[in-house]
């Protein structure tokens, strides 16, 4: 699952912080103080700065204090620059779902303990995904897909308010996802996994790199983000009630797995629709196109306790 290797002493940390994420228990000043108390020099960048994704870190260790969106944007910025392999990443999870942190077993750990654990230099190598569609490339860390999850992301924009806590937002997202699972229509989908055809009519198609997606939906409890394989979840009409039941019965705890995912490295998908998602980002296509999904094997290095 992870390996312990020798790396040079990390004296300087680039801290990327989303001050609007989570319960706002940790201010930028408090985080800098915690990092420096552990023996590091800290270079602070707020993701509220308009040009923060153009950062050029001169440090080996990049710590990201925020939710999945912040983690994704930071790492995708480095993936697109092809400089990601020069850096170690550490996550201080403070978002709503924190799927990436949960997939790396970082959830529910105090920031101070996570920061102190960096000295252990335990590194977990993880994969990433690349989607090529209509002559454009999109990266993902959690999952890419069609159907229920992009519709959920779109519907969540039109409900709720700024006074919601992360826990309340997560419960609302689970309720909305349950409603969608009962009403969302199936769509024809042509999909092949490592050259084998699995086409059919589906209400959800998810190509996952990590076990968790959406509102902490656990698509595959055995999923390993560093095993060199995608998990492909296909939910058909015959799976609808089972899917809805599993979501509805777990509003207080993490939902269990859906149907056993298929495994593969090279995925080709043609969905009869114009919306897809990469992680928590909606992509609207001008016309449906065939998505070619490629696994980027062990491209990222995360520090874990």
Image (cartoon, rainbow, N blue to C red):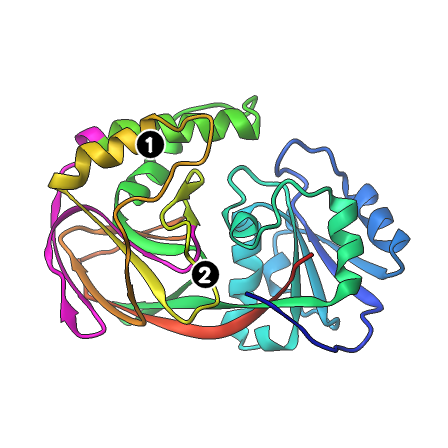
Query: Foreground: 29 or 198?
Result: 198
Task: Classify residue 152 as left or right of residue 22.
Answer: left
Q: Position of residue 226 (x, y in %)?
A: 48, 67
Residue 152 percent coordinates (x, y): 33, 37
What residue appears at the point 65 percent right and 31 percent down from the top-left corner? 23
Q: Which residue is mark 2?
A: 224
Answer above or below: position of 303 versus 257. below
Q: Is residue 18 above or below residue 291?
A: above
In which quarter of the view is residue 150 placed? top left
- Residue visible at 41% across and 26% down in the picture: 251
> What are the residue bounds of the magenta stretch?
182-211
Q: Residue 91: percent from the left, percent from the top?
A: 64, 54
Q: Earlier in the sequence, mark 1 or mark 2?
A: 2
Q: Quadrant of residue 254?
A: top left
Assess whether residue 111 is covered by the magenta stretch: no
Q: Which residue is mark 1?
A: 247
- SS for dot 1: helix
């Amino acid at each position: 699952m992870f390996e312990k290797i020798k790396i040079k002493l990390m004296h300087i940390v680039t801290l990327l912080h989303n001050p609007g994420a989570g319960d706002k228990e940790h201010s930028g000043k408090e985080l800098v103080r915690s990092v420096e108390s552990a023996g590091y020099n800290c270079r602070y960048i707020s993701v509220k700065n308009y040009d923060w994704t153009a950062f050029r870190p001169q440090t080996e260790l990049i710590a990201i204090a925020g939710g999945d969106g912040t983690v994704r944007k930071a790492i995708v910025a480095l993936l697109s620059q092809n400089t990601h392999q020069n850096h170690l990443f550490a996550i201080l999870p403070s978002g709503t779902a924190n799927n990436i942190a949960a997939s790396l077993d970082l959830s529910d750990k105090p920031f101070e303990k996570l920061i102190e654990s960096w000295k252990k230099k335990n590194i977990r190598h993880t994969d990433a995904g690349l989607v090529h569609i209509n002559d454009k490339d999109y990266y993902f860390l959690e999952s890419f897909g069609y159907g229920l999850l992009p519709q959920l992301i779109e519907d969540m924009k039109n409900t709720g308010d700024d006074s919601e806590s992360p826990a309340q937002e997560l419960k609302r997202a689970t309720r909305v996802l349950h409603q969608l699972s009962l009403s969302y229509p199936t769509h024809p989908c042509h999909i092949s996994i490592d050259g084998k055809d699995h086409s059919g009519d589906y209400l959800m198609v998810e190509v996952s790199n990590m076990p968790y997606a959406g509102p902490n939906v656990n698509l595959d409890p055995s999923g390993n983000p560093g095993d060199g394989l995608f998990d492909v979840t296909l939910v058909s009409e015959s799976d609808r009630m089972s899917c809805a039941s599993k979501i509805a019965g777990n509003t207080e705890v993490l939902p269990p797995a859906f149907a056993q995912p298929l495994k593969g490295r090279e995925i080709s998908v043609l969905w009869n629709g114009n919306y897809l998602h990469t992680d928590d980002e909606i992509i609207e296509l001008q016309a449906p196109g065939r998505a070619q999904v490629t696994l980027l094997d062990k491209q990222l290095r995360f520090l874990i306790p």
